[in-house]
Image (spheres, rainbow, N blue to C red):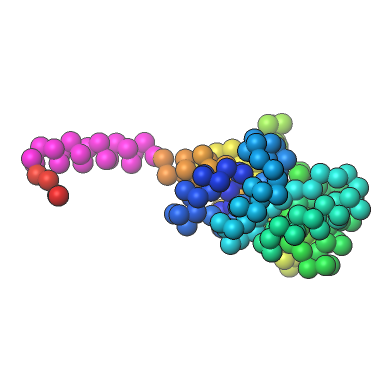
Amino acid sequence: MKFFVDTADIDAIKELHALGMVDGVTTNPSLIHKSGRDIKDVTREICELVDGPVSAETVALDAEGMIAEGHELKKIADNIAIKVPLTWEGLKACKQLTDEGNMVNVTLCFSANQALLAAKAGATFISPFIGRLDDLNLDGMNLIADIREIYDNYGFETQILAASIRSANHMSEAAKIGADVATAPPKVIQAMVNHPLTDKGIESFLSDWEKTGQSIL
């Protein structure tokens, strides 16, 4: 499973990228706002750092506006994935942008029917939002499983990009189901390394090592 980092924080991306943990980056208007920077400047810097797809989101509500914004965003770098919402207008924009040879990430997916439509429209990525479904007492992972089954049934090439990930468990569950990509905040990816038995083991080893009175260096 590929790891995309869901952030516009350059320092966080650099840290994870140095460890080989970044296959791409996703941004959205909220993350751009949080960065406090101009969308084109911060997105360009991310694209220079990361070889994989970098999702930059349109904000227009009509297909014509999304397409125009997508063209402008694509000028930033060749690895831009234009992000459009899963609305009828978004699907129109997806079809045209895809036909032009652009990568398109269709976001805000909450049903298998929506995912099926996005695949038919030629989306490069479909972004089902796990955490927001969990917030409504629905199991977001069931949606990932449903989309995986449908896409496999018909050979759709659209990649499942599990989004709105809130925990390390979300990451492993998405991987087991077969999501192609998971995008998560840096703190979630970093939390995947944590386990109390690892901490306990280190504590025990260090205690015994101290008793030997030795030094490696």
Residue 38 picture quarter:
top right
Residue 10 x %, y %: 56, 46
Residue 156 picture quarter:
bottom right
* Left or right relative to 149: residue 214: left
Residue 43 visible to the viewer: yes
Residue 153 x %, y %: 74, 64
Q: Residue at x 58, y 62 (%)?
A: 51
Observer-nearest of 4 and 102: 102
Furthest toward the top, the residue is 136
Q: Residue at x 8, y 40 (%)?
A: 213
* Left or right relative to 108: residue 217: left
Q: Residue at x 47, y 57 (%)?
A: 20
Furthest toward the left, the residue is 213
Residue 104 x %, y %: 76, 58
The image quadrant where one finds the N terminus is bottom right
Observer-nearest of 98 and 211: 98
Q: Residue at x 75, y 59 (%)?
A: 74
Q: Main secondary structure of the magenta part?
A: helix
Image height of 213 relative to 183, above or below: above
Residue 16 x %, y %: 48, 50
* Left or right relative to 154: residue 141: left
Observer-nearest of 103 and 49: 49
Q: Is residue 161 magenta?
A: no
Count of all numbered marks drawn on residues in the image: 0
Observer-nearest of 104 and 207: 104
For the record, the magenta segment spans 195-213
Residue 115 visible to the viewer: no
